[in-house]
Amino acid sequence: MSNTLSVKERMSIERVAMPELPADLRSRNFEEVNLGLSHGQAVQEARRCLQCKNRGCVAGCPVGVSIPEFIDALASEELPRSAQILRRDNALPAVCGRVCPQETQCEALCVRGIKGEPVAIGYLERYVADWAMSHPELLQGDQAPAATGKSVVVVGSGPAGLTAAGELARLGHAVTIFEALHDTGGVLRYGIPEFRLPKDIIDREVALLTEQGVVIECNVIVGKTVTIAELRSDFDAIFIANGAGLPVMLNIPGENLKGVYAANEFLTRVNLMDAGRRDDSSTPIIKRREMAVIGGGNTAMDCVRTARRLGAERAMILYRRSEAEMPARVEEIKHAREEGVEFVMLTAPAAILGTADGWVSALRCLKMELGSPDESGRRRPQAIEGSEFELPAGVVIDAIGTGANPLLTSTAHDLFLNKSGNILIGSEEESNIPGVFAGGDIVRGGSTVILAMGDGKRAAAAIDKYLKRK
Amino acid sequence: MFEVISNEVLAENLHKMVLSAPRVARARKPGQFVMVRLDRGEERIPLTISDADPAAGTITLFIQAIGASTRKIVATKAGGSIRDLAGPLGKETRITNWGRVACVGGGVGTAVLFPLVKALAEAGNRITTIIGGRSSSLIILADELTPLSDTLIVTTEDGTLGIKGFVTSPLGDLLADPERVPQAVFAVGPVPMMKAVAEMTRKQRIETIVSLNPIMIDGTGMCGGCRVRIGSETRFACVDGPEFDAHLVDFDLLSDRLSIYRKEETAAHPLAECRIAGGIT
């Protein structure tokens, strides 16, 4: 058993490699790339954990998962216990095990990483979460909490909203989620592609919430269908987690040519509306031999890998800094490269060029070099004089970021916003309006799934406190 | 699920559908639209809300079945249901009492024009309504618009009803007559029609509002697909519109962007005439 292994024995185990679909096969379909660990691999990897006292990994996790504990249970092959520990701290473990940037969070602070490779915490999280999903009969259901008689409405069913809803339901509050789109999951569904996060996983996480009594209503656009003022009279508290969801345009000549997509449109067509993924989809998408994606984050990676799967021979990432500065997860960059994505680094678009009949034909680009660090600590890219060149492209996808969607806030005039339109909150996630809390991208601007989940978790605790005071 | 309360055929391919949507009925203002998706796997289609009854919790949509998706929607009988309906979206029409107003509708655009005419009439405007189409069978809502208008003028390209020709010719007469010249013009229809109206009113600097119909996916500002050029700015029709100052609209760009999927749609759905006409109808 795990606790009988000596440190030396633990140290001698090498980090597991995630089994993957071969790159030449997967770059032509939308199936999940990472296949998941086998039971033996997972238990062996769990035994690499030294169960150290300082628990750096937990401090590195935005939702504070009891990492050594769930790993210890897994190492002892006590999967129901492991799953219970994981689920207690994390409402969406099967999602986080797939999309979290572990290398900058839990794994970055793992003691094993100092002299070698950190424990593959993300892989283990995924293994335990997937096991739990396929063995519900072996899991003790949480005892139904006593109803508090308080009601909370959650705006948006993305990562922040789902997390908050799960936490609040567990505390006995009656939770309703209003989702603007026709399906749940927010960015998890419309943004993250199937090959990284299968839709089935989202469906099952959402089903777990509804089993806990959370009511989810789609097609309700808060700010339009109902206003925050109306919700304040119908519910005891509100959590706004409606996401960023307004594309930041490139603001260069040619951005309205046919074949130029904002990342959200490109991904929504494919992920939410099945364009290019299912033959019977009623939503079309433009495919070209050369498709160029502008940006260096996870969204850019999702777009370029999707473009490759739609059949682009040259699927290219254009980024104005170098690969070292790319905000995308290391795994996404690795997978993209294996799938044949071209990385055109230190390159900024100056204009999108078109044909006489209005279709994109190329990008006019400038070569960049890195100067001194800017306020973000990254070296500032600056254009090299006379470095202009043209890059042929039939589709250009703008993945430089998103801003705050104004639909909700434009009908809630008393809500304090910053100059970019994001909701301002205090230390307890509460806005300037009592009982109205906010989190995720509508507060942060474009950020990550796990930070949104952290917000949802903290907001739920703050809402619970607020409701007890009230 | 949104129940179909009634579904009436008003003219060839033109249906008047009343749907149960209590929250939308309560919140809706003239000029706004809903996104409708009949069932799983279907397109999201933007449709103008023609009328609403907040007490009954219903909204009325005039739907012209011009493509595969709209045809499936109008095939839903009373008692049946629409899976998804979200709204009201877009900005409401700025309604004021201008005095004399001309309302110009072309083809399906007349269905979008109807709630504007109604709201303008309620605000006390004296309205000359001009509606046109290729042929008499494509003239819609004439009966409904008559009681709301001081004058209703019909034009058809083939002369089968009303004046033979385009809506622009009676509008030209109106603009040339100092007794009848309107203080504001509302125009909804095919892009070339709206462009022609904008050019006609530009010289006299008559405030002219058009309702634009670019291709849309979500209708909530998320995707940016419906972007239009207004003056020197890129705007999203779903959140900043759909109504804009006609004199600032880049109609050529709108027309070009509406053609994006013509080839893809014909290849993928050879039997469906597709939704190439674009967005909000």
Image (tube, rainbow, N blue to C red):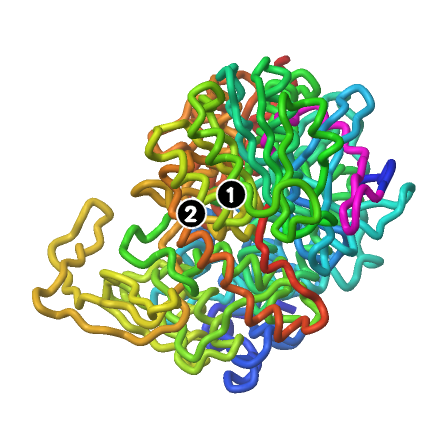
Q: In which quarter of the image is the N terminus of chain A?
A: bottom right
- The stretch in magenta equals B9-32
Q: Residue at x 62, y 75 (%)?
A: B267
Question: Residue A217 location in percent, x, y?
Answer: 73, 39
Marks 1 and 2, Cα distance to the nearest angstrom? Answer: 9 Å
The circle on residue A325 is none
Q: Classify residue A200 by image quadrant.
A: bottom right
User: Can see residue A218?
Assistant: no
Label 1 lies in what chain? B
Could you confirm whether marks 1 and 2 are on the same chain?
Answer: yes
Check disc 2 and report the residue beneath it.
B228
Nearest the eye: B6 or B20: B6
* Left/right of residue B147 with respect to residue A360 in the rendered view: right
Question: Residue A232 location in percent, x, y?
Answer: 63, 18
Nearest the eye: A71 or A286: A286
Tell me which numbered mark, 1 or 2, is placed earlier along the sequence: 1
Q: What element carries label 2?
A: strand
* Left/right of residue A359 with respect to residue A409 in the rendered view: left
Question: Residue B109 location in percent, x, y?
Answer: 61, 42
* Left/right of residue A105 with respect to residue B135 in the rendered view: left
Q: Does residue B227 sit above or below A8 in this rendering?
A: above
Residues packed near mark 1 inside 10 Å, few (<14), some (14 to 19) or many (20 plus): many
The amino acid pointed to by label 1 is Leu
Q: In which quarter of the image is the C terminus of chain A?
A: top right
Check disc 1 and report the residue beneath it.
B212
Q: Classify residue B276 by image quadrant.
A: bottom right
* Pointers 1 and 2 in contact (C-beta within 8 Å): yes
Nearest the eye: A43 or A183: A183
Label 2 lies in what chain? B
Q: Which residue is drawn at 27% across and 54% down?
A: A252
Asked if the stretch drawn in magenta spans residue B20, the answer is: yes
Q: What element carries label 1?
A: loop
